[in-house]
Image: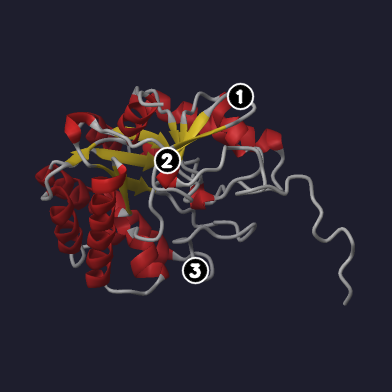
Amino acid sequence: MAISDDYLKYPKRAHGMDHDRYDWSMIQDRPPLKWPGDAKVAVCVMVALEFFPLDQPAKPFKAPGGMATPYPDLRHYTLRDYGNRIGFYRVIKVLDELGVKPTVAFNSVVAERYPQLVDEVNRRDGEILAYGVDMGKLHHGEMAIEEEAELVRQSVASLRQASGQAVTGWWSPARSESMNTLDLIAAEGIEYVCDWINDDLPYPIRSKNGQIHSMPISHDIDDQTIISGYHQSEDDFVDQVCDAFDIHMADSKTHGGRVFTLTIHPWMSGQPHRIKSLKRALSHVMGTSGVWSATASEILDAFKKQG
């Protein structure tokens, strides 16, 4: 079939990604960063607290971890619920033992239904960020802007009321966005987004409602991706987390401060047969000299002071 003359013509063909959301740059060309206490690597552990509805829509797609068998899929539903009932407490105990300050992403439905989880985060001076309403309400390009704006408003407002925190971070369920998502979250006072995974450091993003930042929250080494998505073992998870951290530490010695992030799903790593793997991985990270355990907002604040 012949290719039309318009095949390679569209408005924003440019160096880097084909849009004007940010100024493209290579990491080695940026000024070196310095973290508080002369730390080499800022460590951010993101805990994802999710609610997967039994009647989860199939369109535009099902978020990873969603219901997989015909309704009512009680096997997968109750496994996900395990994370909020039991797994979270195992995970947070490990973080406490190792001195890790948590950043916790809440579907707003989780905070509304289980306020004791919000209390646990606040009691530790951890950070709460908005993770949409639930894992069945995805943001996507075919959604009306008014509908998406209401989902953003509902999630952010609910979490601010439940937690008493400013809630300045956003993570879209399944990292799925529309072309309007960044503008809508900025309008609600969000300062950083965790959906984009094209960098190892924060960077500024333009929106119609002011500048926000991208935070480099991990995807390839999060527990769900490695164990459920890639069907690898718990030992593989430990090896990859440790290897990734070691590379960031090595890079910091020649290129300035680095950010290491790790995403944890309590329904996955909070299982009794997996919790020791999480502890092994984080013991390596936190047992290395030159690390700074911080929330995502603390890392962003330190980054912006050097801009």
Residue at 49% x, 57% y is 54
The amino acid on which the numbered mark 2 sits, given as a three-letter code, is Met
Which of pointers 1 and 2 lies earlier in the amino acid sequence?
1
Query: Residue 31 location, x and y as percent?
Result: 38, 35
Query: Residue 117 location, x and y as percent?
Result: 28, 39
- Horizontal side of 159 relative to 36 (left or right) equals right
Against 107, residue 149 (above or below) is: above
- Mark 2 or 3: the one toward you: 2
CA distance separating discs 1 and 2: 18 Å
Which of pointers 1 and 3 lies earlier in the amino acid sequence?
3
Residue at 43% x, 45% y is 27
Q: Which residue is mark 3?
A: 68
- Mark 1 or 3: the one toward you: 1
Which of pointers 2 and 3 lies earlier in the amino acid sequence?
3
Q: Which residue is mark 2?
A: 215
Q: Which residue is mark 1?
A: 209
- Horizontal side of 198 relative to 274 (left or right) equals right
Against 254, residue 280 (above or below) is: below
Against 135, residue 160 (above or below) is: above
Q: Are marks 1 and 3 in contact (CB under 8 Å)?
A: no
